[in-house]
Image: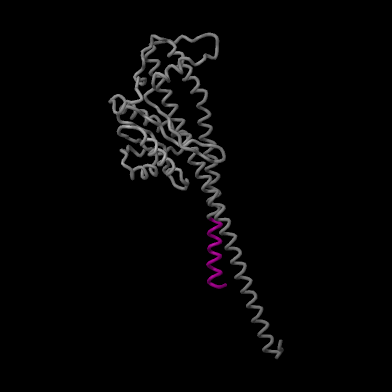
Amino acid sequence: MSDTSAILLSKIDGTEKLKSVVRTMKAIAASSIGSYENAVLALIDYERTVTLGLAAVLRQNVVKPAPHIEQASSNAVGTIGAIVFGSDQGLVGQFNEIMTTFVIDTLDQLPGEKKIWVVGERLFSRLAETKLALVGPYPVPGSVSAISQLVGRIQIDGDTCRLNNEFAQMYLFHNQPQAASQYQPVCQQLLPLDARWQRALATTPWPTKALPEPVGEKETLLSDLIREYLFISVYKACAESLASENASRLAAMQRAEKSINELSDQLHRTFSRLRQNAIDEELFDVIAGFNALTGFKI
């Protein structure tokens, strides 16, 4: 076997191993997408319960606005905080680049200073190239069970900043999964929860004819429910970001698998051609030797 053929066989073996790795990563990504999407679906009933609880409390006109609810005008200027979800791992296509561009373009339209809490080392490294003040990076959860821990940590840090009046507004940025392994960046305002939000909840239709009566101190109950509402918002954003990340990874692996298959076919064709050429040369040598020994002339 020639050196060229040996090199080709080595490359063919390498592509087969790489193809196996890509198939495994595709399976893991597809499984992860389902897990995180199920985590979002599992929040639906709880989110509805919290929303109805808020509606019940806000119907009571005697309730004073909770500390989370502010009568902020659209012209209010102050430090703007943002929680941005990215990725820690690679092989996710343009996942972090798209989010970086979306965050910069969105925040450029808002007045005041900006301070960004970044989830994900790779997104952090890209935003570090801008003039935005960054906090983090927070580690990206590796499973559904780890999301609550991250959200709890963010919520504790957020409560500290809110009590110190560090932020006039707080926004939430993440990628949201779409059909066919697609995703798009979205932005949600977390704080302040303004009067329009309060009125919308207060007018939410109650599902039964019997109207509820909140039990206990209404101000405390309202504050606790709003805290749960914010927890759900950040938890959902994290789960949707993780689903989008794995969708992007799945698409990247599909493109990689296609490229590997094309490369493998090309290598096999080249090897087959070299092998046929070697066989032809050996046949010509045999024929030439036979002709030399027998004196046969063509």
Compared with 194, 218 (above or below) is: above
Our reading of the magenta stretch's main secondary structure is: helix
Please give the range of residues in magenta: 1-17
- The answer to whether residue 5 shows anywhere in this view is yes
Question: Residue 162 at what x, y percent from top left?
Answer: 31, 25
Given the current orientation, which residue lies at the most extreme left position?
164
How many numbered tags mark residues here?
Answer: 0
The part of the image, by quadrant, that contains residue 261 is bottom right
Query: Nearest the camera: 3 or 82?
Result: 82
- Residue 256, compared with residue 267, is above or below; it is above
Residue 9 on the magenta segment: yes
Q: Which residue appears farthest toward the bottom when viewing the image?
A: 295
Quarter of the picture containing the C terminus is: bottom right
- Residue at x 41%, y 41% (from the top left corner): 101
Residue 174 in percent (x, y) is at 44, 35
Image coordinates of residue 203 in percent, x first then y, are: 48, 15
Is residue 13 highlighted in magenta?
A: yes
**Identity of the residue drawn at 55% across and 60% down:** 13
Which residue is pictured at 54% across the width and 36% down the height? 34
Residue 27 is situated, as x and y percent measured from the top left of the image, at 55, 44
